[in-house]
Image (spheres, grey):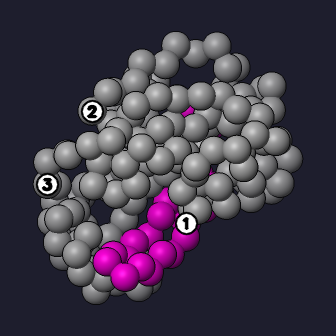
């Protein structure tokens, strides 16, 4: 499990109003924080998915978007997306902003900043085994064959349609 991180505490307009420890934000839905997700597509019409480490607190072993993580206190979401992409996949990419979504769950509430890149598909990926068990390039037709988190499945299919991939 990753160490605790200090995150920006935000209001329902996504304005910073203080700080909160990640461990607290994951136990208290009134502590709204920011997270990022990065979707990676290739020019062959495939999407990169990763299998989360079995050591993760949330969704261990589940398949999900290529990269996800928390935005640290005083960090811009794009910087968090780039940091997480380097940490989890060993890639430095030109990420593009896709959008922002608001999620309210029983245990946590978050703004999810979503970024993407379209790759050649031949980039050398080096996974961080503390974060990721495995990764795969899959076609959009294969998306429903994997035990993806609901957020990942919905995001992949929505982006495919909206980006015309």
Residue at the spot x=31%, y=82% of the render?
Answer: 29
What residue is disc 1 on? 100
Bounds of the magenta segment: 92-118
What residue is disc 3 on? 4
- Mark 2 in CB contact with mark 1 (< 8 angstroms): no
89 part of magenta stretch: no
Say if residue 21 shows up in the picture.
yes
Horizontal side, residue 115 vs residue 42: left or right: left
Upstream in sequence: badge 2 or badge 1: 1
Label 2 crowd bin: few (<14), some (14–19), many (20+), radius 10 Å: some
Q: In the rendered structure, find residue 130 and report the number of the disc placed on it.
A: 2
x and y percent of residue 9 in the render? Answer: 25, 74
Upstream in sequence: badge 3 or badge 1: 3
Residue at the spot x=37%, y=77% of the render?
Answer: 109
Residue 35, compared with residue 41, is above or below; it is: below
Residue 92, compared with residue 147, is above or below; it is: above
Residue at the spot x=58%, y=51% of the render?
Answer: 148
94 part of magenta stretch: yes
x and y percent of residue 14 in the render? Answer: 40, 76
Horizontal side, residue 126 vs residue 152: left or right: left
């Amino acid at each position: 499990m990753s160490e605790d991180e200090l995150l920006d505490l935000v209001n329902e307009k996504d304005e910073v109003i203080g700080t909160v420890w990640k461990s607290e934000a994951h136990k208290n839905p009134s502590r709204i924080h920011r997270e990022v997700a990065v979707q990676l597509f290739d020019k062959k019409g495939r999407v990169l998915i990763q299998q989360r480490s079995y050591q993760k607190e949330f969704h261990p072993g589940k398949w999900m978007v290529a990269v996800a993580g928390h935005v640290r206190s005083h960090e811009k979401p794009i910087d968090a997306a780039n940091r997480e992409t380097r940490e989890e996949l060993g890639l430095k990419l030109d990420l593009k902003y896709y959008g922002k979504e608001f999620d309210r769950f029983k245990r946590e509430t978050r703004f999810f900043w979503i970024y993407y890149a379209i790759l050649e598909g031949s980039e050398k990926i080096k996974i961080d085994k503390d974060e990721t068990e495995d990764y795969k390039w899959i076609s959009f037709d294969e998306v429903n064959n994997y035990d993806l988190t609901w957020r990942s499945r919905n995001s992949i299919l929505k982006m495919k349609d909206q980006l015309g991939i």
